[in-house]
Image: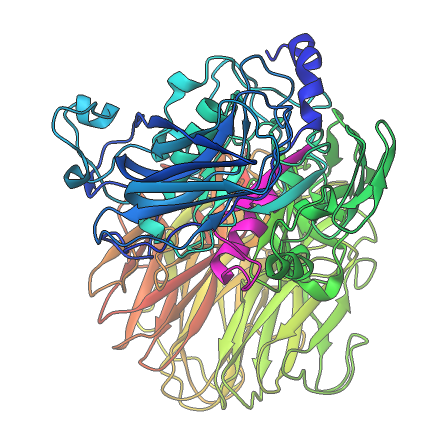
């Protein structure tokens, strides 16, 4: 655990800061170009410390406030600055230096060096006065002149830093080697910029952030010599970061991004060995290619006190951009890097990049704009501020400072948090509750026009997607404990995610009650209270189901509807989903102009209504109810059987051999046959297929012994083979099949039955949720299923489905992009496939069908007979004991 007493004792250092740094000499680009941050040397791949060297050369006083270091050859170096013994001594006049390029021998222009404010990193024994360091690139000669300053401080020295890893050609024989050379490893290649955690293993992890942690080059990766830092980090006594200050290093000459790590190492060595600081002053550094470097030690995820902004280091962190930004602005890559690391750090503490905060002054001073600050008083700052906002300096340069306004709005949605679950305010440490319906409310300080969409994540998987103006969304969850978050997708492409809320869901298993098939909705006539009109592109109609047509007003968890799409004008799909929830990507019917396509739908009921969405063109929709599931009162449980073929008019299986004529009916005995109980059966689940039709027609499947209603189950035209799942009540132990026009062959395969005996499985809603898509590789390999091919999908223990106790899953399976006439069979993995089929199709068709498939070994298999085809599977629920 972190020692808070130590942090409090050292907290006084937090008032101190670092001014911007001056310019550097023109450099020859190192190998590798500006595309990536690389090590300073030309060759090496090992991550590890690089030992830098500091060389000091005394300046010679000339009297009258002047001192010089004559032009001379020096040890190799890349960064320079001037120091003196007493940090409190006033340095007047002008200090200028220039360097000689180690490769070309050319001398740079004179560079003005500005003194650093004393006490930047607190009052420290052995600290020196100094100028800002300047990066000049690989150099081997220097010259310094000091003039016009009156009495000069004692101990004036030129400090030359070789950051280590420099090219071998710049080294003289017999000189000290850096750590990488000592180990026998050459140091080159692109730096490791993977996200890094806290460097201190004894420190608790920092708080999670709503913004993702960007890739950061760790201290180990840029070669920090940790032997320079034996004091350990300083942590913010408040444990928070309330603002970030943006700086520039003010190097006026260009640099190549392959040199960035060396520049950071040079600043590190200078801050410690020349200034006498405990460590590098900045918390993070950014180069013009957008690479972020970890600065002061202690951990990327920690609240670390730096030495970056005099008087304002408490509750803040400093981000320095390599380069000078007075004449020109920072690159887009650099701005993006600032935005990402600032959003991450502020997101750890519920901060808003575009907001304000209150800071306490640690020093009496006046900033660049003439605002005076008094010690101990509180002042308002923007959460992303420039160095000049707190100190009298040009840093971070006129152009970068002007860019801060757009930077503040460049991050993801801020202060994003879940506020309510199912209408109950979220309380820290208190689990939220759900009965299967999950309504999440959230808030953010970011304007809606900057947010493209929100996603509700359940256990990391999107469960609902809504617009950027929404602040609530409803979906369905399974029984168990879930982590619920909200993800905001900003218009600029950046994302943020709320901290997780623990939701404990207890879903009561539901039993099935069959009803005589009855038409509830028909957009052609306005039946069901829906408008008498086709459903347009992107349109939705909503049908009340609870409390109507014998369906209870309360306790209904799902209804079973046979939905038919007819008269479509364009290729499209229809999704049937619980009203009051956010529609997912799952579809139930797919069709093209001229088709009439039916499909059985088991759709959850949340607010007593069911919604129907059409994607393209216009279409008429019809819905016939065949039953409902309820968690209250009596009902039937489900028992798997099959898939097993019970009827085939082509061979006379189960019924007389012969097509069913116009207005004809065949009746199939089901109770007491093929393993089905003789008594107690309330409904059977049949996959019914119509084939060889001679005219456009429909087939109705209904309980024998009852009067047939207007409800239909299959619609077809000549040349088509159409399947559909049917859940049909059983009244006198038999089921009847009616054909309206022409002649047709019918096939019926049983997959299960419902019984009032109560020893079967109960139903639980889940979804609709997409489990499999061979086009995208979701759930199975990304490839069409070939002739005679099989793919197997894991269902138990995934996507909220229990790992054990599941007897069957309810899937809407869609076949698309077929190359030949074929059929698909869906059957329990671990069993032998029977002759039963679930989908039949021809090239150019997209055909859906609901499947209730038993689960034996936790998986479900899909077999394709001919050609190749893509398959999609959306789950709507499962049965379990």
Whether the magenta-drawn stretch holds residue 331 is answered as yes
- Residue at 65% across / 77% down in the picture? 622
Q: Quadrant of residue 694?
A: bottom left
Describe the colour scheme in one phrase.
rainbow
Task: Please identify the residue farthest to the left as the structure is shown.
Answer: 173
Assign the N terminus to one quadrant of the image.
top right
Rendering quarter of residue 168? top left
Q: Is residue 880 above or below residue 867?
A: above
Quadrant of the snapshot with the C terminus: top right
Q: Position of residue 447 (x, y in %)?
A: 76, 60
Residue sitting at the far front? 63
Q: Nearer the viewer, residue 649 or 10?
A: 10
The residue nearer to you, when weighing 805 against 754, is: 805
Q: Position of residue 549 (x, y in %)?
A: 79, 64
Compared with 869, 819 (above or below) is below
Residue 115 among those drawn in magenta = no
x and y percent of residue 197 in the render? 47, 29
Q: Is residue 25 in view from this perspective?
A: yes
The spot of residue 71 in percent (x, y) is 32, 42
Q: Which residues are magenta?
A: 316-344
Q: Residue 550 sits in which quadrant?
A: bottom right
């Amino acid at each position: 655990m972190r020692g808070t007493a130590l942090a409090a004792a050292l907290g006084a250092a937090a008032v101190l800061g670092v001014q911007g740094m001056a310019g550097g000499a023109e450099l020859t680009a190192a190998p590798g170009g500006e595309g990536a941050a690389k090590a300073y040397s030309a060759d090496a791949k090992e991550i590890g410390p690089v030992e830098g060297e500091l060389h000091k050369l005394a300046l010679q006083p000339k009297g009258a406030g002047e001192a010089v270091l004559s032009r001379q050859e020096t040890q190799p170096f890349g960064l320079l600055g001037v120091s003196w013994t007493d940090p409190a001594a006033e340095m007047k006049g002008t200090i200028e230096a220039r360097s000689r390029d180690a490769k070309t021998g050319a001398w740079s222009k004179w560079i003005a060096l500005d003194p650093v404010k004393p006490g930047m990193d607190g009052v420290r024994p052995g600290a020196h006065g100094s100028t800002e360091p300047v990066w000049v690139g690989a150099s081997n000669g220097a010259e310094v002149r000091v003039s016009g300053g009156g009495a000069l401080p004692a101990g004036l020295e030129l400090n030359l830093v070789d950051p280590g890893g420099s090219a071998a050609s710049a080294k003289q024989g017999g000189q000290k080697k850096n750590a990488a050379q000592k180990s026998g490893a050459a140091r080159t290649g692109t730096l490791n910029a993977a996200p890094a955690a806290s460097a201190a293993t004894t420190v608790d992890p920092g708080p999670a952030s709503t913004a993702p942690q960007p890739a950061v080059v760790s201290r180990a990766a840029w070669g920090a010599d940790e032997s320079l830092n034996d004091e350990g980090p300083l942590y913010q006594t408040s444990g928070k970061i309330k603002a970030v200050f943006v700086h520039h290093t003010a190097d006026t000459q260009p640099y190549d991004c392959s040199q960035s790590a060396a520049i950071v190492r040079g600043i590190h060595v200078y801050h410690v060995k020349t200034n006498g600081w405990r460590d590098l002053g900045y918390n993070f550094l950014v180069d013009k290619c957008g690479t972020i470097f970890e600065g002061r030690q202690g951990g990327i995820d920690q609240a670390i006190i730096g030495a970056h902004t005099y008087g304002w280091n408490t509750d803040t962190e400093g981000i320095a951009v390599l380069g000078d930004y007075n004449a020109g602005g920072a690159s887009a890559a650099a701005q993006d890097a600032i935005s990402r690391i600032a959003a991450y750090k502020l997101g750890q503490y519920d901060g808003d990049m575009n907001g304000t905060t209150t800071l306490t002054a640690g020093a009496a001073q006046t900033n660049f704009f003439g605002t005076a600050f008094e010690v101990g008083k509180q002042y308002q700052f923007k959460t992303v501020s420039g160095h000049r906002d707190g100190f009298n300096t040009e840093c971070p340069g006129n152009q970068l400072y002007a860019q801060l306004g757009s930077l503040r709005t460049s991050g993801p949605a801020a202060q994003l948090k879940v506020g309510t679950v199912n209408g109950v305010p979220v309380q820290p440490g208190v689990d939220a509750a759900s009965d299967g319906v999950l309504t999440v409310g959230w808030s953010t300080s970011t304007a809606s026009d900057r947010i493209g969409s929100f996603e509700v994540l359940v256990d990391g998987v999107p469960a609902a997607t809504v617009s950027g103006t929404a602040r609530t969304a409803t979906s369905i969850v399974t029984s168990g404990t879930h982590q619920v978050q909200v993800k905001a997708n900003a218009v600029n492409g950046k994302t943020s995610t709320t901290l997780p809320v623990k939701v404990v869901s207890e879903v009561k298993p539901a039993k099935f009650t069959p009803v005589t098939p009855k038409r509830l909705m028909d957009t052609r006539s306005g039946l069901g209270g829906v408008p008498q009109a086709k459903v347009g592109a992107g349109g939705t109609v909503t049908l009340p189901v609870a409390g109507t047509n014998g369906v209870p007003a309360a306790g209904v968890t799902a209804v079973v509807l046979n939905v038919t799409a007819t008269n479509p004008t364009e290729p499209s799909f229809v999704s049937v989903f619980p009203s009051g929830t956010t529609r997912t990507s799952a579809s139930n019917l797919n069709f093209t102009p001229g088709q009439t396509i039916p499909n059985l739908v088991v759709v959850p009921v949340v607010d007593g209504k069911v919604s129907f969405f059409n994607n393209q063109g216009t279409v008429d929709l019809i819905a016939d109810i065949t039953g409902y599931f309820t968690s209250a009162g009596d009902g039937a449980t489900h028992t798997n059987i099959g898939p097993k073929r019970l009827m085939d008019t082509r061979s006379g299986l189960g019924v007389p051999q012969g097509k069913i004529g116009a207005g004809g009916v065949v009746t199939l005995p089901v109770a007491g046959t093929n393993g089905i109980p003789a008594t107690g059966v309330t409904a059977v689940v049949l996959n019914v297929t119509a084939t060889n039709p001679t005219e456009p027609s429909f087939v109705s499947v209904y309980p024998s012994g009852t009067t047939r209603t207007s409800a239909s189950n299959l619609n077809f035209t000549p040349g088509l083979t159409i399947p559909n799942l049917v859940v049909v009540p059983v009244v006198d132990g038999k089921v009847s099949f009616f054909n309206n026009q022409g002649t047709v062959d019918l096939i019926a395969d049983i997959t299960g039955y419902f019984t009032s005996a109560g020893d079967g499985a109960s139903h639980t809603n889940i979804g609709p949720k997409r489990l499999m898509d061979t086009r995208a590789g979701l759930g199975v390999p990304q490839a069409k299923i070939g002739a005679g091919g099989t793919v197997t999908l894991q269902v138990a223990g995934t996507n909220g489905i229990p790992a054990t106790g599941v007897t069957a899953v309810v899937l809407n399976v869609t076949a698309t992009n077929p190359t030949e006439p074929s059929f698909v069979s869906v059957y329990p993995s671990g069993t032998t496939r029977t002759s039963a089929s679930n989908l039949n199709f021809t090239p150019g068709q997209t055909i859906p069908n609901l499947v209730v498939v038993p689960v034996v070994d936790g998986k479900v298999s899909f077999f394709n007979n001919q050609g190749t085809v893509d398959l999609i599977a959306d789950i709507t629920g499962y049965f379990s004991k």
